[in-house]
Amino acid sequence: MIDLVVLTGAGVSAESGLATFRDAGGLWEGQRPEDVATPQAFARDPDLVHRFYNARRAAAGEATPNAAHSALAALQDRLGERMLLVTQNVDGLHEAAGHRGVIHMHGALNRATCGACGHRWAAPAVMETDDPCPSCGAPATRPDIVWFGEMPQEMERIYKALDAAHVFAAIGTSGLVYPAAGFVDVAASAGVLCHEINLAPGGNPTFHQLFSGPATQAVPSWCADVEALLG
Ligand code: APR
């Protein structure tokens, strides 16, 4: 029985040195999403898209989990199956902190997939346009990332959990990209208590409580509060 659903965004990895998307100096400042994060962009210029994700894969490989990732993993150690973590992030920092069973709704940099047969495997550090699929051999390999216009992963499981939970928390996300941005509405309409943990209020009045501050400070303290709340 899931009592707690946590959604994380780029803000939870910011203090590990990974750029967010929409803050100053963010990824979408240097690159337009329509040029590197859509199926059309990949069809138009696969080399550019691979370069973008190869650079992000390298940066993620250098990064280490921060106190927010560790606090969430420790909370899972205590709550077990009562807690589900869904991340919009494609880095592996939750897993590196010891978190198990993370749902990567936007995919993961350390996974590759084949556009021809759908096979998934561990991505090499550097992916190139004509890499053959290890399963069917087609030169149709791509990062296992959910691009704009594509369906995020595990949505049915996420909505079921949102309906059943007692608490929903969105951590370090601007709440601008759907369907993740709508999770708070689904949760609130099911009578779930909704918490936002962010540097600054995201402005969505549906959240019942804001825990503000940098994730490495606000998340550990929120984990203690929510554990007491759930009992
Ligand atoms: N601690 C807590 N929150 C932080 C910190 C920090 N140290 N630094 C930044 N934030 C917050 C910002 O206030 C902002 O609300 O993290 C959020 C980052 O927002 P975005 O850059 O929009 O990242 P995210 O919400 O994860 O984007 C969602 O958009 O482009 C797509 O697929 C991409 O998964 C991504 C999705």
Image (cartoon, rainbow, N blue to C red):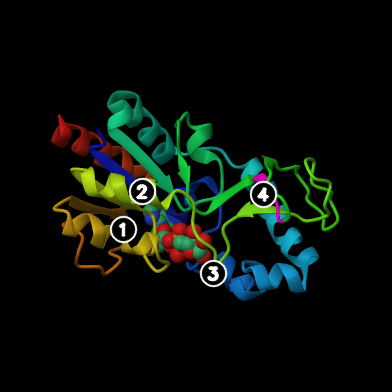
**What residue did someone put label 4 on?**
118
Structural distance between the alpha carbons of marks 3 and 2: 19 Å
Identify the secondary structure beneath mark 1: helix
Of badges 3 and 4, nearer the viewer stands: 4
Label placed on residue 183: 1
Q: Is residue 67 shown to the viewer in this render?
A: yes
**What residue did someone put label 3 on?**
149
> In front here: 54 or 178?
178
> In front here: 96 or 46?
46
Mark 1: amino acid: Phe
Find residue 192 and report its horizontal and vertical position in percent.
17, 50
Of badges 1 and 2, nearer the viewer stands: 2
Q: Can you say which quadrant of the picture contains the C terminus?
A: top left
Locate residue 208: give its quadrant.
bottom left
Q: Earlier in the sequence, mark 2 or mark 4?
A: 4
What span is in magenta? 111-115
Number of callouts: 4
Mark 4: amino acid: Gly
Structural distance between the alpha carbons of marks 2 and 4: 22 Å
Q: Residue at x 48, y 51 (%)?
A: 105
- Report if the CB atoms under discs 1 and 2 are less than 8 Å apart: yes
What secondary structure predominates along the stretch shown in magenta? strand
Whether the magenta-drawn stretch holds residue 114 is answered as: yes
**What residue did someone put label 2 on?**
158
Local packing at callout 2 (Cα closer than 10 Å; few below 14, some 14-19, many 20+) is: some
Identify the secondary structure beneath mark 2: helix
Q: Is residue 7 shown to the viewer in this render?
A: no
